[in-house]
Amino acid sequence: MRIVSAADLEKVSRSGLRKIRPEKPRIAVGLATCGIAVGGMRVYDRIREIIGEQNPDIELARVGCIGYCREEPLVNITIPGKPLVILHRVTPGDAEKIVRAVEKGEVPVEKALCRIPSWDHITGYTQEYGAGFDGIPRYGDVPFFSHQKKVILRNSGLINPEQIDEYIAIGGYAAALKALSGMAPEAIIGEVEKSGLRGRGGAGFPTGLKWRIARNAEGDRKFVICNADEGDPGAYMNRNEMESDPHMVLEGMLIGAYAIGASEGLIYIRAEYPLAIRRLETAIGQAREYGLLGKDIFGTGFSFDIGIATGAGAFVCGESTALVASIEGRTGRPHPRPPRLTDPGGGLFGCPTDLNNVESWCNIPVIISKGSEWYAGIGAKGNSGTKVFSLVGKVDRVGLVEVPLGTSLNTIVFTIGNGGAGNKKVKAVQTGGPSGGCIPARLFDTPVDYESLNRVGSIMGSGGIVVMDEDTDMVDIARYFINFAASESCGKCVPCREGLKHTLLILNKILAKKATKRDLEILTDLTETIVATSLCGLGQTAPNPVLTTLAYFRDEYDALVNP
Amino acid sequence: MIQQKIPGKPVTVTINGKKYRANEGEILLSVAIREKIEIPHLCFEASLDPYGACRLCMVEVVRKGKREMATSCTLRAADGLEVLTDTPEIEKHRSILFELYLAEAPKSDVIRDMAAHYGVTRTRFLKRIEQGDPLGNKCVLCGLCVRACSEIMGAGAINFINRGPYTVVNTPYYAPSRDCFGCGACVRVCPTNAIEMEDVGADRVMKSWSDTRVPLSQCECCGRYYAPRELSASVLARLDTPLKEEIARLCPECRGKQLAQNEILAGRGGRATHG
């Protein structure tokens, strides 16, 4: 069936709703890579074993992940007319108990984390599950969730990412229909500009402006690319976004391609994300069947399709020019900009190319659906919208945290994350991946926005937040990140290739207690030169962990060096 | 990649406070070279696209009272462009870069002299000395050989291997290359004279490139081996000259002699023959 109108979407939506909120109870197991890793698949298989292949009374489904990593595996129960209940830390041994309870229209209360009576899917549909189960805490009362605002993760963990009908049921592709059949490309770009959305890959370049440049670039053939080469240690926002809700990425790209005037799209995704690749492939296939990708989409005459390009294991390929080189089959090494991707001759196969991060694309359907004013109302001035962070390391509540930009580190680490794991004292966080800086606990009132993080010597990056406690050796942390950056350097320019190598050698010397004060001076000189003279962002930011630990934790260095 | 073939309109750029004429879009480093303004560089070659890897040619661009570092090989001349080439900031970073080069290519005289010229005579970093390095511990990975081989010769016989600090240049799998013409362009462009090439008997041996052997043409007259056989054949195929036959058979020296001989014979009323 081809979807060409609002009526068609409505028809598919009804069939999808029957899956999300069936007339019979539904058990849905969180099966993103994280859930599978902690045994979610075994839980799923055990439940399947108990209820059988075709059970007339119980539906069994797979969903993505709602982001509370510490409490996985997570299982959702939907009893008709009752709130959705999230069960946590579920084991295959719990399966029997769950099924028996569900058969009676109940849930195993002792496994329940929270209940969701109604859920706003943002893009046009609020799911009213129902009332009851009053003894179970409400979603909004769970400390991990209470300060979060789910805009990007609006559907994650609640819908089956392998069923396009479920995405359409909660308002999916309605924004694309609105944009393609009712808005001029200029108007769409205007909306994205007014929303204030900035690139979620880390640099924070205004997305609308990038689109405008790409639209105005000369060329008959243009590309849009989704940068899904997420590779920061401890960061997995994009993985979850693609695994839990792949269609929001596709819908964002479809709207963007139409606004820019591109007919070809590519998702550049790291090969280490096999499940995300599979779910994206499934999603692309389903979107094609409905005519949401391909020729003459919605009968508007606009044609657009998306392909997948997998990376070959290089961190630097997340850099735009290296990414393009990699897709073209060349070695992933950055070249100086300009020419930028949007410049003539600078993009993929020489064509003007717009490159946005996964999470940037995820925001687009929301901006079109709710309007730029609504979107700009979230977050802080000049930093609108929400951002997903992966809160990891030595923090009590590990998980994906989505908060409005401008939320303080205190809120994220202490209110949401509940401070150090095992009641240890939190010493610092490292934001922005290997190129980020370490921010000491005394600066945790810093709002998390692009500029404020820069002021304290760190960066937003893609959104990793690694928590360190009193036991963490900060010099060793700096060495860890420098080791990562040195081995991921492409080797093209000398400050990054040679400079990071020598930075690592000096840090090793310090940690072996063989260094002197003079080595610290050399370390400072060298890292400053790497920042100032490196060719691409990797080298320019790689010394940040050293520079910030030198600034904030100098005593730890001093304690290790001889006079 | 770079679309800049037609010279742009004349513009004025300021280098170290002095004004110079340039064409819009012209590479600033080229302007400096033409005007004999000293900016050190290792990876720049006018016939190749700017590469920006050696970072030695960094200058400070003055814009609205603010200064910003940029490589002059990727900087394009525009009206009002103002740069400084020897600020304390530049000197500081350049010295560190030279120290890194001294550690990376400790056996290179070129690097040693160049660094000394800028006042850097020793390095505080651990020197990398590798026994049996095919490039004699002189390579600075500027990429000129790789780019000349692929971009100019179209051979692509050598390339970068590994990444980061483990990067080296050589043939794929360190096996003798079947794509190498033995043209020696790599040897000519190498700024540190790191690449070894030698004609041994009937072959040219690219010693640095996994001992790749390329057969040479033999002069029919003196018996000397003088040019890579396949390369001459491919060049000759593109030539249209009556001298083609001679070029194919004789070394440049014998060809000269033969030409002179023919001229003399022609002067005596004899018949000039080609071959």
Image (spheres, coloured by chain):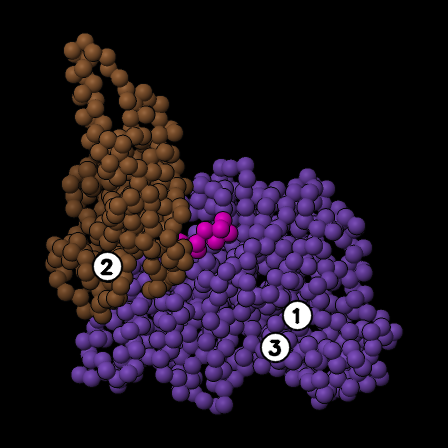
Colour chosen for chain B: brown
- Location of residue B54 by image quarter: bottom left
Question: How far across and how far down the image is residue A14, in percent?
Answer: 80, 60
Magenta region, main secondary structure: loop
Establish if B123 lies above or below A107.
above
Q: Which chain is purple?
A: A
Magenta segment boundaries in residue numbering = A326-337
- The CA span between labels 3 and 1 is 13 Å
Sequence-wise, which precedes: disc 3 or disc 1? 3
Q: Secondary structure at mark 3?
A: helix
Question: How far across and how far down the image is residue A247, in percent?
Answer: 66, 58
Q: Which mark is residue B136?
A: 2
Q: Secondary structure at mark 2?
A: loop
Q: Nearer the viewer, residue A20 or B126?
A: B126
Q: Which mark is residue A37?
A: 3
Q: Which mark is residue B17?
A: none
Q: Nearer the viewer, residue B169 or A116?
A: B169
Q: Assess whether residue A328 is covered by the magenta stretch.
A: yes
B8 left or right, relative to B36: right
Assign the C terminus of chain A to one quadrant of the image. bottom left
Establish if A411 lies above or below A496.
below
Residue at image coords 40%, 47%: B178
Residue at image coords 16%, 46%: B38
Q: Amino acid at mark 1?
A: Gly
Q: Nearer the viewer, residue A270 or A184?
A: A270
Question: How far across and how far down the image is residue B48, in percent?
Answer: 32, 42
- Location of residue B217 by image quarter: top left
Report crowding for label 1: few under 14, some 14 to 19, many 20 or more residues within 10 A (C-alpha): many
B39 left or right, relative to A474: left
Report crowding for label 2: few under 14, some 14 to 19, many 20 or more residues within 10 A (C-alpha): some
Which chain is mark 2 on?
B
- The CA span between labels 3 and 2 is 49 Å
